[in-house]
Amino acid sequence: MRRKRLLIALLIVFVLIGGTLIYFSTFKLKHVNITGCELSDEELIRQTVKDYAYMDNTILLYWRNKFNKIKGIPFVAKLEIEFKSKDTVNVTVYEKKIAGCIEYMESYVYFDKDGIILETAKDRKKDVPLIEGLEFESWEMGEKLPLKDETKFNHILTITQLTDKYSLYLEGIEFTPEGDIVLKMGDIDVEVGDGSYLAIQMMNLGNIIAELGGRSGVLYMKDFSSDDGVASFKTREMIKAEEEKAAKEKEQKEKEAREAKEKEEAAKAGKDSKSESTEEGGEDDDSDDGSDDDSDDDYSDDYSDDDYEEDYDSDDDSDDYSDEDYDSDEESDDDDFDDYSDDSDDYSDDGSDDYSDDSDYDDGSEDWE
């Protein structure tokens, strides 16, 4: 009897266990409804949730996540899973706040408000400001971005928080080499200086941009340090005209400087050339004097009177000249001499004086130098 009761009890237990297993098997996870995804990958989250469920069971998934939250999904701070039906769960995604992204090796590196690197991707995510002008050497996934200047990251965090607070559209942030911050807000670049007055600037920025009426240009707010501060605006056309004017002025100054330098070099070259020619002329005079003396001596040595007489006497052609020819030649020579004499009278003393004046040219060239 007792043995029979034991068998009945065991049978009931098996039936209950079997029934429970059969009932649990009906809780097959088929649908995962996700809300709250803006930056994170919805399909990645759905697949992660399904992989986290034991035997694809919705009840087991719910209790497991209750005591051990799902972690490690890019851009996701936490997930809340709600049991909706036997085959369906609702997942609410709480994303990490992304401070911005930087462009690196043709990819975008995303980091959160703590500077922790969340993900790299080829595509630029919408509404995430692109940060330019940050300096770092290397980085690792899941680690803090190693910035050389932590002040810049503090400015990024302040700007992104104020952007959310005042519902401003921020496309990018640029840190210039001069230490200024430029906010990229659509077609308008906003220069806010070194970040000392970000709170007051961001509070008034929305109203100022609204008054611009969609124009494109640069808004200067470096000195906007109080509620009654003054901001100035220049359109792209104005900036382009100013840049072209400045470029022309610069080009003109460079041209004038270049021409002045060329003139100076030409004058210097002319001066050096004149000096060299003067020195060479002096040397030539001395060499001419010496060569004349030597040539006279050589000539006198080579050609003696005896040689001349011998040469003259040995000339057979001299016999051909008759006395009559000689006389006629003599008369012609006299006539030529008379003509030369007449011409020589034309050379007056005035002419010689003029020539002597010209001889002073060398003195004038030295004074010029």
Image (cartoon, grey):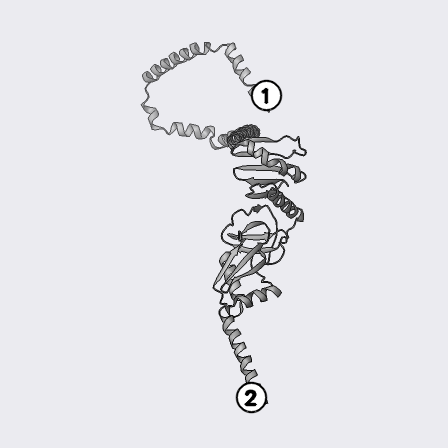
Location of residue 62 in the rendering, given as x and y in whole percent from the top left corner: 56, 64
Secondary structure under badge 1? helix
For disc 2, the marked residue is 4
Location of residue 157 in the rendering, given as x and y in whole percent from the top left corner: 63, 47
Quarter of the image with the N terminus is: bottom right
Residue contact between numbered discs 1 and 2, judged by CB atoms under 8 Å: no
Name the disc covering residue 363, or none.
1
Quarter of the image with the C terminus is: top right
Foreground residue, 232 or 333? 232
Secondary structure under badge 2? helix
> Looking at the image, is mark 1 or mark 2 earlier in the sequence?
2
Q: Residues within 10 Å of mark 1 (few under 14, many from 20)?
A: few
Residue 270 is at least partly visible in this image: no
Instruction: Give the answer, above or below, for where 16 lies relative to 235.
Output: below
- Residue at 48% over, 69% down: 26
Res 193 quadrant in image: top right
Location of residue 321 in the rendering, given as x and y in whole percent from the top left corner: 33, 21
Q: Left or right: where does residue 325 sit relative to residue 161?
A: left
Foreground residue, 273 or 324? 273
